Image: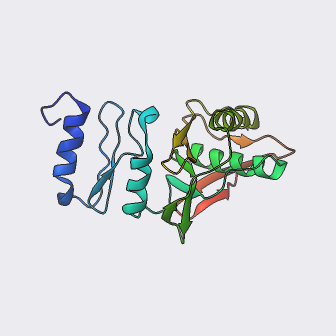
Amino acid sequence: MVGCNKRSALHHWLYKHAAQCPLVIAPYAGYQSVLSKERILSIDRLDFDQMSEGDLTELVVGQVPEGLRIDYKRDLYGNSDADKREVLKDISGFANAFGGHLIIGIEEQNGLPVSIAGVAGENPDEVVLRLEQIARTGLEPRVQGLRVLAIPLSNGSYCFVIRIPRSWHPPHRVAAQNSNRFWIRNSGGTHEASV
């Protein structure tokens, strides 16, 4: 592609040539970087487990808006049936469209991230397990490849990132808590799909 075999070299090349393109989506061995405002953002990178507070800061500083593939949530989803249906709606909406990321712990205004508040007072391992379990038992068919990551912040709290891959076997329906609905995401948010 550019005469380099290493992902870091490709990332450097894309970053160097970013000003030449208004939007770049560059697949390379499964790697996708999204260029926004002439900056390459690493939310879609392969090494998901290595995401850090710096990656989240990049989203805020770059003013990456909510849209088709990203959604910010200030607060953690609760334990009520309505809260579980809400997280399942968001996950199924992404899976039934193009995949994406739910980022919990980032405050947004008018769809733009304004600060990384984080979620305090929660055991991050328990939250990750709870979110994975809700997705595993509440969607039919299951979304394969869904990942949840707790990112420690310098203020002692955590952000949680749910990576939802694009499903090649949609539609996924919310089948939990007496719900039987299909959702899809577009640039305006998540909406009930007509089936």
As displayed, is residue 16 above or below residue 126? below
- Name the image quarter holding residue 12: top left
- What residue appears at the point 51 percent right and 41 percent down from the top-left corner? 151
- What residue appears at the point 62 percent right and 39 percent down from the top-left corner? 170
Quadrant location, the N terminus: top left
- What residue appears at the point 52 percent right and 38 percent down from the top-left corner? 165
Q: Is residue 108 left or right of residue 137?
A: left
Q: Is residue 161 visible?
A: yes
- Residue 27 at x, y percent in the picture: 32, 39
- Residue 22 at x, y percent in the picture: 26, 61
Farthest residue to the front: give it.
155
Q: Pick whichever, 59 or 44, lies toward us.
A: 59
Q: Is residue 128 left or right of residue 109?
A: right
- What residue appears at the point 55 percent right and 30 percent down from the top-left corner? 145
- Residue 95 at x, y percent in the picture: 58, 43
- Residue 105 at x, y percent in the picture: 58, 53
Please name the colour scheme applied to the rendered image. Answer: rainbow
Q: Pick whichever, 102 or 126, lies toward us.
A: 126
Farthest residue to the top: give it.
5
Farthest residue to the right: give it.
178
Q: Is residue 66 visible?
A: no
